[in-house]
Structure formats: structure tokens, C-alpha cells
Image (cartoon, rainbow, N blue to C red):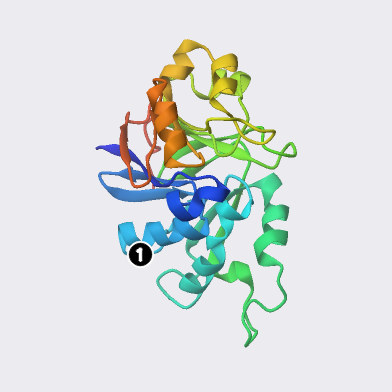
Amino acid sequence: MIWTLHFLGVGNAAAADQLGSSSAVIERDGAPALMIDCGQEALAAYQRAYGAIPPAVFITHVHMDHVAGLERLFFAARFDPKYCGRVRLYVPAAVVPHLQARVADYPGVLAEGGSNFWDAFQLVPVSSGFWHHNYWHDVFAVRHHAPGTAFGLRLRGALVYTGDTRPIPEVLSQQADHHELIAHDCGLIGNPSHSGLDDLEREYGEDLLRRLLLYHYGSVAEADAMQLRGYSVARAGQRVIVSTPAVPPVQETA
């Protein structure tokens, strides 16, 4: 089985129109297994790539460039019996109230009434992790704005996806200890909410730096500059082969 990480978009909020909203899909043998984040541009990119809506999404945090596509996803799922109530949203438990306030609390999601926002979805609050397609996915807190509002994802032995974050060396020492590929938020210049290249070079050792694949940047020129400095940089639409997860799937029993 071949596992890949497909980058639907790699841009920060200001560059999403050109580079796509930062989002990725974990694939198995080319088939989508789990979408990570669902910004407006990301949902459109997913539908172009797979000809359908995602059956499962993990949400890292609730900035609109990561969740704005959920409204369109609601309408697509709500009126399709194949999907209604079956699209899984894996959401860190601490993030659920913020997501409710951000996208689900508008009075009367349908003008005709008779429907709640969550009727289209299967909401799965998560803490340390969750099972999906019989594989365990670890969830961990990152440093992005207020504590406890943003989280990353790990498929042990295969990949770590940080979501939006400042450097987190103490976290990655535990969450990336099986030689995983690390898809990491990084622009050329950092700020109080996001990592810059100098931040990563100051905070991370050589082992982590060699495994980084950078995304969530502001322009093609930024990406080119980081690549010229010797770093791997993800591009929109790129698929990257990752290792087979280290932990085998649980075996279903009757």
C-alpha cells in the first residue's frame, strides 16, 4: 500500500487566492482517506481532485482560511442522502465551542427551517487522538494564538502535520520520534502567530530540519527563497510519498 500526502493548498490567509488555502489529504493508494482543514479554496480543490466531497475532515483550528469551506460542505452533504449525517468532522474537543460559534451558530441555517448545521455531519470530538479507517491518529496542541485553540495531527511513522504554529521543539521531540515527514507551517519571515525560517533554524536540531516540508507561506517568491536555502517546500497540488504507518491497523471483530 502506498501512502501519500496531497497538498490541496499551501498559502497563508493573504495568499490563499493564489496558492490555495493550506490543506492536505492523506491518501492510500491514491484514494483520499482524510482531509486536513477545509478552507473555501481547499474544498474546491478537493472536489476538482476527487470529483466528490470529503467523507472525513480533521480541523486544526477555526480561522476562516481553514474552516470557511464548511458552509459549502454543509449544503453539499445536507441534500445528498449518500452523505447527509455521514461526513465525519474530527474536531479537538477544546475547539468545538469555537467552531460552533464560528460556523454553526447562525440562526436558521436553511431559510425554510427544519435543519441544524450539524445534521449534515457526524461530529467526533477528539482529545489525544482518534481512530479513522482503523488507524490511530494522534492529536497534539500547537502554539497559535490562544493556548488550546490549535492542534496538529500525527500518523505515527508516516507524517506529522503541524497546522498553524510557532516552533514547537518540545512537542515534536515526542510527536515526530519515528522519523516522520514533518509538514510545518513556515514563511520566510515569522510573526507572533506563525513560524519563520529563522525561528525554525534557531529552535530545531538538524534531525528535525532535515525532515521538514514547509507550507503556509505568502508567495511563490517566498517558497523559492526558502528552497534556495536548502529546505523542502510543498507546492499546491503536490503529492509526497510517506512511509507506511508504524502501527498496524486494529483488526475489526464481529
Could you say which quadrant of the image residue 94 lies in? top right
Check disc 1: other Cα within 10 Å, few if <14, some if 14-19, many if 20+: few
Q: Position of residue 112 (x, y in %)?
A: 62, 88
Tell me which residue sits at (61%, 55%) in the image: 64
> Where, by quadrant of the figure, is residue 123 drawn?
bottom right
Question: What amino acid type is highlighted by mark number 1?
Answer: Ala
Left or right: residue 97 compared with residue 14: right
Q: Nearer the viewer, residue 63 or 114?
A: 63
- Image coordinates for residue 178, horizontal then vertical, percent: 43, 20
Q: Can residue 71 be spotted in the picture?
A: yes
Q: Report the residue marked by disc 1.
A: 52
Picture coordinates of residue 199, whole percent (x, y): 60, 22
Q: Quadrant of the N terminus?
A: top left
Q: Of all residues shown, which one is farthest toward the top?
A: 206
Who is closer to the viewer here, 53 or 198?
Answer: 198
Residue lying at 61% horizontally and 81% vertically, measured from the top left = 110
Residue 133 left/right relative to 102: left
63 relative to 128, above or below: below
Q: Is residue 195 above or below residue 8?
A: above
* Residue 29, image x, y percentages: 25, 44
Looking at the picture, does residue 230 appear above or below residue 71?
A: above
Q: Name the residue rendered at 71%, 39% in the picture.
A: 145
Q: Quadrant of residue 142?
A: top right
